[in-house]
Image: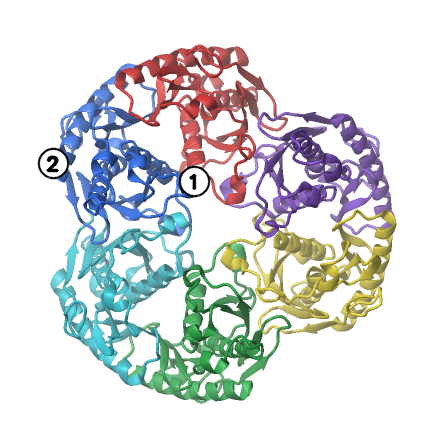
Chain colours: A yellow, B green, C cyan, D purple, E blue, F red
Amino acid sequence: MRPSKRQPDEMRAISFERGVSKHAEGSCMVKFGDTHVLCTASLEERVPGWLRNSGKGWVTAEYGMLPRSTGDRMRREASSGKQGGRTLEIQRLIGRSLRSVVDLQALGEMQITVDCDVIQADGGTRTAAITGGFVALHDCLTWMHARQMINIERVLKDHVAAISCGIYDGNPVLDLDYAEDSAAETDANFVMTGKGGIVEIQGTAEGEAFSEDQFGQLMGLAKQGIKRLVELQKMAVA
Amino acid sequence: MRPSKRQPDEMRAISFERGVSKHAEGSCMVKFGDTHVLCTASLEERVPGWLRNSGKGWVTAEYGMLPRSTGDRMRREASSGKQGGRTLEIQRLIGRSLRSVVDLQALGEMQITVDCDVIQADGGTRTAAITGGFVALHDCLTWMHARQMINIERVLKDHVAAISCGIYDGNPVLDLDYAEDSAAETDANFVMTGKGGIVEIQGTAEGEAFSEDQFGQLMGLAKQGIKRLVELQKMAVA
Amino acid sequence: MRPSKRQPDEMRAISFERGVSKHAEGSCMVKFGDTHVLCTASLEERVPGWLRNSGKGWVTAEYGMLPRSTGDRMRREASSGKQGGRTLEIQRLIGRSLRSVVDLQALGEMQITVDCDVIQADGGTRTAAITGGFVALHDCLTWMHARQMINIERVLKDHVAAISCGIYDGNPVLDLDYAEDSAAETDANFVMTGKGGIVEIQGTAEGEAFSEDQFGQLMGLAKQGIKRLVELQKMAVA
Amino acid sequence: MRPSKRQPDEMRAISFERGVSKHAEGSCMVKFGDTHVLCTASLEERVPGWLRNSGKGWVTAEYGMLPRSTGDRMRREASSGKQGGRTLEIQRLIGRSLRSVVDLQALGEMQITVDCDVIQADGGTRTAAITGGFVALHDCLTWMHARQMINIERVLKDHVAAISCGIYDGNPVLDLDYAEDSAAETDANFVMTGKGGIVEIQGTAEGEAFSEDQFGQLMGLAKQGIKRLVELQKMAVA
Amino acid sequence: MRPSKRQPDEMRAISFERGVSKHAEGSCMVKFGDTHVLCTASLEERVPGWLRNSGKGWVTAEYGMLPRSTGDRMRREASSGKQGGRTLEIQRLIGRSLRSVVDLQALGEMQITVDCDVIQADGGTRTAAITGGFVALHDCLTWMHARQMINIERVLKDHVAAISCGIYDGNPVLDLDYAEDSAAETDANFVMTGKGGIVEIQGTAEGEAFSEDQFGQLMGLAKQGIKRLVELQKMAVA
Amino acid sequence: MRPSKRQPDEMRAISFERGVSKHAEGSCMVKFGDTHVLCTASLEERVPGWLRNSGKGWVTAEYGMLPRSTGDRMRREASSGKQGGRTLEIQRLIGRSLRSVVDLQALGEMQITVDCDVIQADGGTRTAAITGGFVALHDCLTWMHARQMINIERVLKDHVAAISCGIYDGNPVLDLDYAEDSAAETDANFVMTGKGGIVEIQGTAEGEAFSEDQFGQLMGLAKQGIKRLVELQKMAVA
């Protein structure tokens, strides 16, 4: 039995609230149950130095947690003077995931930065950030399309979404909340496209090593979950 | 005529939404028009080193802006490796303001950190942070009172709230939004208690120096505005 | 009775020693009693990036304290790796104050940096820095005028000086020294021009809130003090 | 055809040179072809703060690259003032991997730090570091066993090794060198124990997403490669 | 001919002004011509961690330059976020030099920090800092002796002073000023005790290598100069 | 008797292994007994800003120690966020020493960075780094000569090598190892050219001051040692 009484293959309530920022070209407050992440997509005309005069654009991401988004207050990274390894790891993952569905050549020499700030955390913040970040990115590209800066059909090749799975109390379960995440034997994050292609897999044994079989079960759950997330994204941006 | 069509002594729509954080002992999303600040009050059992074994507690504040809370995306302070002078200045002001209505002796050796994170900015973020931070602090103390950790009557001596005023296009106006703030000749922030005592005054001439008379007019507006803010705080926490 | 036996409206002995630096275009050792601040004004031909090709110049300030300028040795900011919030707050104040009397357009695309380094501290370092920084700035502009780089009449619009006031032992007093500053109930800093215009006001209740009346008394003292400081500046640069 | 003419399932020449450091309790220069990583295991008697008085020990890792270990000289991280995201990500992975085969309770309150410094890089530095780091850790534990500080049989539960796989020019290949790594469509790292349990999986699509089938092929190659690495480790430490 | 018209073995005008700081236990403004260094010696009761409970004390030094102590304004180290290599090198040298004449056992578990801040620079700041730092240290020890905290006879074993020499325009000269320093072929700093013992020698060829003979000439000049500096120190502290 | 049983004027076994890096234009693993330093010389086409368009090139050095190159593990400088004073001091010394034998005009506008990373430390790492760094630099210049980028005869004016000497147990000895270094009364480093010119001298009294006579004995040993080192360099690069 899961702490939340959910079925093994049952995700939390998922919602996307678009247009939450007055300023950003695209924005989305994504909720996976009690995990709430504010995603904004900001258009900038300058690209990183190594892309200058290449004709190609860039999509990057930054991630942060508000100090009291968590059960115990965390030290503010701005105050400690650096972003921790976990933060850097997550924002690199979000950036790679979003780029996997963007044609950077078709985007042209512009940069979109997707900021994912965790307002409230209850497990799965990185998967929520990718899934909601896609919506913010989509809306930023729509904004650009409306201004004839790009052709969104050519720039955005597919959907992308992410979900976590894990082995909790011996059973494979989908979309771990914090209570499960901190007790899970194995924890895996999957990022997939709307067409079902795999973009990222990260699996970690917290205690004992896991078997190929168990990993296969997790992937099965993830495929099912991401299929549903993409449907929800489509409904949200329709 | 103000850009927002408001009367000179008219504040923006003010609202306090309490209990917005699942984790924090006290929390409040405060809105001054399009300026939205998430305030959380976090209780910690350890105090700063210089207060250890003094029997006295501490209230402190931290302030941050989400990168795209502003019209142009700002660099994330966690990524640039330090908090800027403006950030440090504001969070010191919030902390002093909140401490002015707390009896630190009656609080006892505990620390409350009030985090004020700007979700969306449209001028007046520091005054919104103080005004909403008070509500979060109040609710944290209520939480402690309910657990018989303190007697809130003895700890919380008064209300405290803040408002900006300025001279815009030659006229004194109350509660500047961003359009006014960036064009104002003079900009002043006032922090006052529920009983009308002054806690902080900060007045700055942006271009020409201002006169004592003009300053008196700003203070008149501020007194009126803060009186109204305290009424709204009282309704919110009733 | 004040610890220094001064009358409530009596400032400490004030002196300006000009030309104390062999290298700087303008320099001044300013003393407010035992508070000694070395101010140098340095001319640089490059302006900050956001002013390039604007035809406008810039005046900025930096502030520092020698480690043993204070009663107890403070940690050197260069060694701790960053400037503290108080330092940043003060140097922003000095810069704004000096810019309030400079016509940046008439200065032309050049930058003057006024460094204010506290050699010995006994309260009121920021007000001494502004008041002495003006003299260093004046002498730098005189140096430029002599070389026909600018017309000082057009660049320097007025004098600017600063003084602190406070409520000590229930009485409003002018120009607090350290003994008073650390015990004052209320502490305020005023920056005004030679013509009596107000440039900056910063008032802070250290313990109890203060009333509008009390603040009026402080402003009265400040006006009187700054009038005297400007007379002394005029004698110094005559 | 692979640039190195290797068969798809052929690893590079692997070697372990033990005892290369005069000072470290355990050390190993591991070579995967032209990738050379110096691994040292250092015993320290103090554990991180959160383990003090827990009776449990800790194994952690740090990773670095010499500036000219790579084709183009990289900036020295000590000089740039911080470790990059990639470095932090890799050293966290090495630490988790090594801890997966250590019984921290049986280790007792001591810490072992495994430093993995890349002397020469040609792809696969993180997998070489884990595989060679295990040998250094093993020798450190042997050193402790010989001094009757621990019982190595109880502390070290299994072997652990790692290998990369990828899809290069459309074909799944084992143990990518730099030429392959920089051109691969998909890149995956696997960490497994001697008994075949999976400890970590990280798969990334560099360009196009990959399919579940392709991922299965990579895992098949990895299992085969890690089996061989564990045999080589056993021969090395025999 | 030297730019200053001095004889090859002629030092600049040297002066020591003691007691220049109201707060420091010992202080001295030392001048070597236009090079002015403010030296303060601060007594602290805590020693570095590695000396705790050893019964031994510590003498350390810090060095800094005011931003406009030099011909061109230098960036403030507090603002750039770190002390440069030259600064660290010099303050380590000052510390070692002063410790060479102190019996740390006889000092007892206390720390004296000698801050040497360059108010105006014209070459030879490190040698002035050592020579004047000795006077500040002496006066701090006298202060302690007067309070029966130490016996200065036992703590302070000798005098210590420093001077630079160099080969300028082919000739060995004593006490280089900035004009000579920046053009010298060889530059050497000598630190010696009152009894003539050598504490530190640092010789550097700026362009061509120098010969043992030339070095001997520099040492001859240095011995003569330091002998005179020690006489001046003795007169100053008499 | 020296701990290593060496004669007073006997150096440790010295060896140079060239071409140890697959990537660097020049490289050398230098060993002075158990002190092992990996030196790589990297050619870059851009020079520091202050040399741009000057027609002159630059040779610089960086120095680092692997964390467990020493008896006790040291904290990694990349992780502590800055290079210590000793590191900066040493890398400045290496750079100056190597530049003393290079004609920067003849090199042309290119930069060579010599990285000296201590793989294992047993005293004398800086002298080994200079001596081996010369070999790496030589091979980098040979590489450039072979590609007709420079004429090595004109660029490389001489050999340069370095050795330490000290007074151990009352006797002057050559090439201190760690056991001697940590107990020596006086420690001196000499850098000289193949023609016998002196480039750098650094002598430090660790406890008692030393006499001119003693210093002369150390210099005598150094001349003899460096003569031998230059012979060995010549054999190595022949």
| x then y, percent, for residue A173 | 82, 61
Can residue C20 be seen here? The reply is yes
Tags 1 and 2 both on a single chain: yes
Q: Amino acid at mark 1?
A: Trp
Front residue of this view, candidates F232 and A23: F232
In this rendering, the answer to whether D200 lies above or below C221 is above
| x then y, percent, for residue A143 | 65, 69
Q: Amino acid at mark 2?
A: Met
Disc 1 chain ID: E
Disc 2 chain ID: E
| x then y, percent, for residue C150 | 24, 58
Circle 2 sits on which residue?
E235
Count residues near mark 2 (Cα–Cα under 10 Å), then give few for <14, some for 14-19, many for 20+.
Answer: few
Query: Residue D119: which quarter of the image?
Result: top right
Q: Disc 1 vs disc 2: which is toward the camera?
A: 1
- The residue shown at (43%, 68%) is B55
In this rendering, the answer to whether E200 lies above or below B229 is above
Q: Quadrant of the C terminus of chain E?
A: top left
Query: In this rendering, would F176 be left or right of A49?
Result: left
| x then y, percent, for residue A147 | 64, 69
Circle 1 sits on which residue?
E50
Front residue of this view, candidates D55 and B201: D55
